[in-house]
Image (spheres, grey):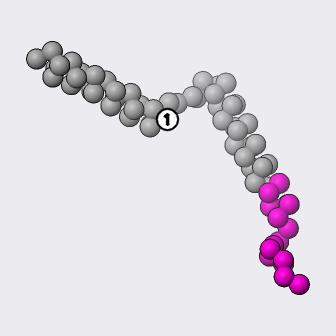
Amino acid sequence: MNTSEPSGRDSGTEKLNWIDRRREKIRDEIERNRRGEYTVPTWVLAAVLVLIVGAWLALIFLAG
């Protein structure tokens, strides 16, 4: 018979394992944050830098 699932794998188990791994990663992150090991993601720092430089340039060009 033709089925959409591969014959050698059980997609229910695979999905459960993915969910378990995701939950474990979330638990680990929460524990790190509670210990004070929280770090700001690089993309957030980059976005803040772009906003600051953009505001500074806008101030220079619009005021001058």
Amino acid carrying label 1: it is Pro
| Above or below 1: residue 35 | above
Q: Position of residue 45 (x, y in %)?
A: 41, 31
Give the residue drawn at x 38%, y 27%.
48
| Above or below 59: residue 7 | below
Give the residue drawn at x 79%, y 48%.
20
Badge 1: few (under 14), some or many (20 or more) residues near its Cα, within 10 Å?
few
Give the residue drawn at x 34%, y 27%.
51
Secondary structure beneath disc 1?
Answer: loop
Q: Main secondary structure of the magenta part?
A: loop
- Residue 50 appears in which quarter of the rendering? top left
Q: Is residue 55 left or right of residue 31?
A: left
Q: Position of residue 28 (x, y in %)?
A: 70, 37
Q: Is residue 61 magenta?
A: no
Q: Is residue 62 left or right of residue 20?
A: left
Toward the left, the furthest residue is: 64
Q: Is residue 21 left or right of residue 35?
A: right
Q: Nearer the viewer, residue 61 or 15?
A: 61
| Above or below 64: residue 3 | below
Q: Is residue 3 magenta?
A: yes
Q: Nearer the viewer, residue 59 or 16?
A: 59
Q: Position of residue 35 (x, y in %)?
A: 65, 25
Q: Position of residue 44 (x, y in %)?
A: 45, 32
The residue labelled by disc 1 is: 41
Toward the right, the furthest residue is: 1
For the C terminus, the image quarter is top left
Task: Tell me where the magenta segment starts and ends, as one range.
Answer: 1-16
